[in-house]
Image: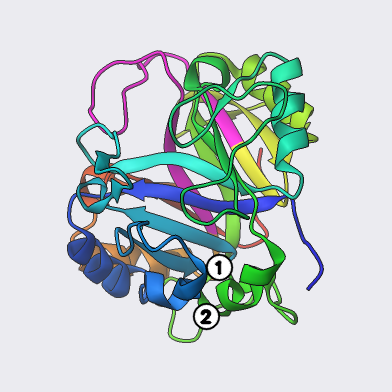
Amino acid sequence: MSSPFPLMFHPTLIVGDLEEAADWFRKVFGRTEVRWEDKWDLSLLNPDYPVNYSYFFVIGDVSLDVLAPSLLVLPGDREAVYPKGQGLADIAWYADDIEDLAARLERHGFRTRDQEGNIIRDGRVPESNLVADCPMIWSLPEDTGLTYEYYHLAERHRPKYSRLADPRLALGWRPGVVAPGDPLGVVRCAHHTVLTEQPDRAVRLFEVLGGDAGPRRHDVLLDADVVPVRYADSVIEFATPRSAPILDVLTGAPTHTDQYLGITFEVLDLDAVEAHLRSHGIGVERADDELVTDPHTSFGARWGFVPTGRKES
């Protein structure tokens, strides 16, 4: 299987109740959860590593990790540290040469850490607690604004992993195909939205990774200045609000740290999307050809929808 990397691995949505979230995604997005035992050959993994603390949901070309921190107890009985609340927390990326990536980020002033919280120096990335040949690292939000994970998926795990958890890795996968029975008619991801007070820092980070920044624009619904960055077949829009303060998406407290606000999808019929969301009690806001949900009614995330083929202005 040839490597498609770099590619987005998954966004992470933090929830309080995993089963409640699974029921919501079935009703609202028409997606059934992918469980741990369906993602991996468990005989290859560290037997002490926790399982079933998260579900994956494949939505268009996005594999979303929905995670309940209360269920995640790491080896050594260490609890994962997440603030209270629900919302999008971070973005993970696949990486083939993770040692080179860690060293390159360090050279440009962006530190990374391992699973134990230790700062990585000179590209010396340790084995992961999950399985030795799938090392993973995280950026420090003090340096990168948002936490970004970088993850190497070893070749031997990819055939099983591609069956349900990430169909993009399978031979013959085609983008832009609406899933059968999808009540929202999702075609593909349009962009991810991250609030930031330092858009230039975000641009510099992704330029180091090999990404490109596009022309800046004004977002009417957010009343924010936006710079889009394209990297690894994904677009992240870094939005700087003109008047409103940036709030922590998990706690609601004012913050100066970047915040992962939402994911916007291209859809076939915006009117049908609005009717479906309202039928499930989800608050929506609409401005012409863009519709977004009220995070208080959609697990702390701002889910956006635009007509397929829409041009940003």
Q: Residue at x 66, y 21 (%)?
A: 121
Examine the rendered structure and indicate whether residue 195 appears above or below residue 70.
above
Examine the rendered structure and indicate whether residue 205 appears above or below residue 166.
above
Q: Secondary structure at mark 1?
A: loop
Q: Quadrant of residue 99?
A: top right
Residue 209 sits inside the magenta stretch: no
Q: Is any part of residue 289 visible from this angle?
A: no
- Tell me which segment is drawn in magenta: 237-265
Q: Residue at x 39, y 69 (%)?
A: 36
Q: Earlier in the sequence, mark 1 or mark 2?
A: 1
| Disc 2 target residue | 179
- Position of residue 264 measured from the top left corner of the image (x, y, whole percent): 50, 51
Q: Please, what is the three-letter code of the amino acid marked with disc 2?
A: Ala
Q: Is any part of residue 241 visible from this angle?
A: yes
The quadrant in which the C terminus is found is top right
- Position of residue 284 measured from the top left corner of the image (x, y, whole percent): 30, 50
- Position of residue 225 measured from the top left corner of the image (x, y, whole percent): 56, 22
| Disc 1 target residue | 60
Q: Is residue 169 left or right of residue 239?
A: right
Q: Please, what is the three-letter code of the amino acid marked with disc 1?
A: Gly
Q: Secondary structure at mark 2?
A: loop
